[in-house]
Amino acid sequence: MTLIRTRLLAILTEAIQPLIGSTDEAGTTAFTIELDLPKQPEHGDYATNAAMLLARRLRQNPRQVADRIVAGLHDPDQILARVEIAGPGFINFFVKPSGWHRVLTEILAERADYGRRNLGGGRRVQVEFVSANPTGPLHIGHGRGSATGDVLANILAACGYQVEREYYINDAGNQMETLGRSLYHRYLQLLGDPTPFPENHYQGEYMIELAQAFRAEHGDGPKHLPVAEVLPLCTRYAGDKILEGIRNDLADFGVRFDVWFSEQSLHDRNAIAETIADLERRGFIYTADGAKWFKTTDFGDEKDRVVVRANGVSTYFAADLAYHKNKFDRGFDRVIDIWGADHHGYVPRMSAGAQALGRAQGDLQIVLVQLVNLLRAGTPVAMSTRAGEFVTLREVIDEVGTDAARFIFLTRRSDSQLDFDLEVAKARGNDNPVYYVQYAHARLSSLFEVARERGPAPPAADLDRFAPLTAPEEIQLIKLLGEYPEVLANSALHLEPHRITYYLHQLVAEFHSYYNRYRILGEDEALTEARLGLAEALRVVIHNGLQLLGVTAPEKM
RNA sequence: GCGCCCGUAGCUCAGGUGGAUAGAGCGUCGGACUUCGAAUCCGCAGGCCGCAGGUUCGAAUCCUGCCGGGCGUACCA
């Protein structure tokens, strides 16, 4: 949080504390002061509604309360030009230009650290995302999920959490067998077997390529082995190869994971049975119709869920319970799952699971990512996972690039659907929001190059240097720069990465406008130096923001 | 049927733990490059924030009902 905001909050707290301290009989003096940025300039640089919120509590009318608060304000550093009470009881603060100039000194002192803060206090958070089944390549929807998870992890790390990124590999169960059989059939087809490819198997082109690779490695020999022997080989081969492709795609998309967690490993170490036994000891398991049920309704789910089927085989949900128990056993304070929105029906039962295992409700948070509507020049691109017709993440990266794809994925809140137009995403022009932001960075970078050619670097960032910055546009820019830490904190709090994208867009829009209206390099030396300082601060914040998004901040483009 | 999410400018969407006159991009139309990058900027037009009630000093925001759309509702994974 930047100086002005912090100081105002401190000043206000000091003025308000005596009022509520003496009158609240319950002894609860907790009161959160809100500071808004008013839209109307007449309403000052910051405004608070504290007087109106306190009016009832103090049994006085809001204007009176505002009077008392204002009377108690002390401003030792003289950052305020004046304070006004307006409307029903708003208190409006007008900051002196010199107060704003302090923001620039702070940004230029902190540089890459500007915006970071310690909300997390070093607590450990795990972000689990993508976790796509290794039965086919990642498609564009996974791209959105991976960008969301990756950036969320960046944001939390910047806010003082110790973050781990994890990918859960669903490498157990029927689908892996189906995968193995799919490869086997394609392989036999390559060797001239006329049997048609079974319907409910993986249809995609990639299976044929995989079969070719398999044949190149293993020759024709496996054809003559017993099926029971070949299938496991096929399953392992296909699973490994596909997972390798997924890792490569994600790496090229700028996403890395700390842990790749295998579902099979849970089965191997009997973790599922142990988890069910644990829940049984806690009294959340009962038997009915030959199956074992978990009482998720105790925690608000609409019906109880089977964890062990009548045939003795545990369900996928049981594995997921074991997996989440494992997460908490590893000592994470918070666990965040990023899921496709089509899984939203599972949220209550998973949340029930976490609570039954003894965790507080907020320890597991689930972020839902809505689907991506893929378009090309305005017309929808048909996709069907089942038929194996889909646009892969790889194709998106190759066609539009990582920067554009990541940025566009993060232009909407994750729980609303997103139109992704391939032609717009790869356009170099003004349709494309990435270049708008990157262009500002390149523009600033080249500005400094010109400045260097013309003369020596300006002096270090002291407060006096910025005194010439008095234009309303300049103050407005500084104000926005000062909000960056607040935006970052809010996006961490709400788990909403798109706030960063919006902020950058707004900041850069104001900069472009300013740039067209004012000359930064002029005859007046002092003014030039001041504006270069502002420009440098802008470059720092744009750079920091883009870095959070995993998008490059180019010097030239 | 039940549950969750969503209805904001022509289109795509921000704003949603209540705040003062609701924003952006795209699209339409008209303007600005001999001077730091025109991938930019400036201007015009565009709205009963789905509808109806309620809560309050104050509602796009919270509550209820209705209308319209999406998704989910397995002893699948």
Image (spheres, rainbow, N blue to C red):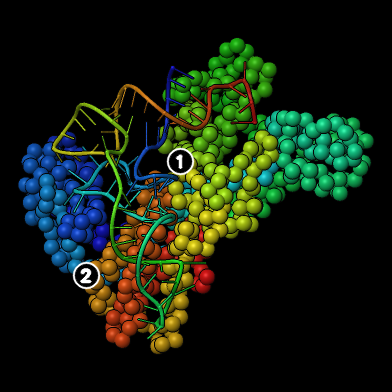
State the CA–CA distance, disc 2 to disc 1. Answer: 40 Å
Mark 1 neighbour density, 10 Å: few (under 14) some (14–19) many (20 or more):
some
What chain letter is assigned to the residue under label 2?
A
Q: Is A259 rendered above or below residue A329?
A: below
Q: Nearer the viewer, mark 2 or mark 1?
A: 1
Against A153, residue A201 (above or below) is above
Q: Residue at x 48, y 41 (%)?
A: A417
Q: Which residue is mark 1?
A: A415
Measured from the top left, where is residue A387 in percent x and y? 68, 36
Task: Confirm whether circles 2 and 1 share one chain.
Answer: yes
Left or right: A179 as drawn, with respect to A302: right
Q: Can residue A206 be seen from the camera position used here? A: yes
Name above or below for residue A122 compared with residue B67: below
Check residue A97 in the rendering and tell me which mark sits there, or answer none.
2
Question: Which residue is the extreme one toward the top?
Answer: A289
Q: Amino acid at mark 2?
A: Pro
Query: Measuring 90% from the left and 45% from the top, which residue is drawn there?
Result: A219
Protein chain holding label 1: A
Name the quadrant containing residue B24: bottom left
Q: Position of residue A215 (x, y in %)?
A: 86, 45
Q: Residue at x 67, y 22 (%)?
A: A313
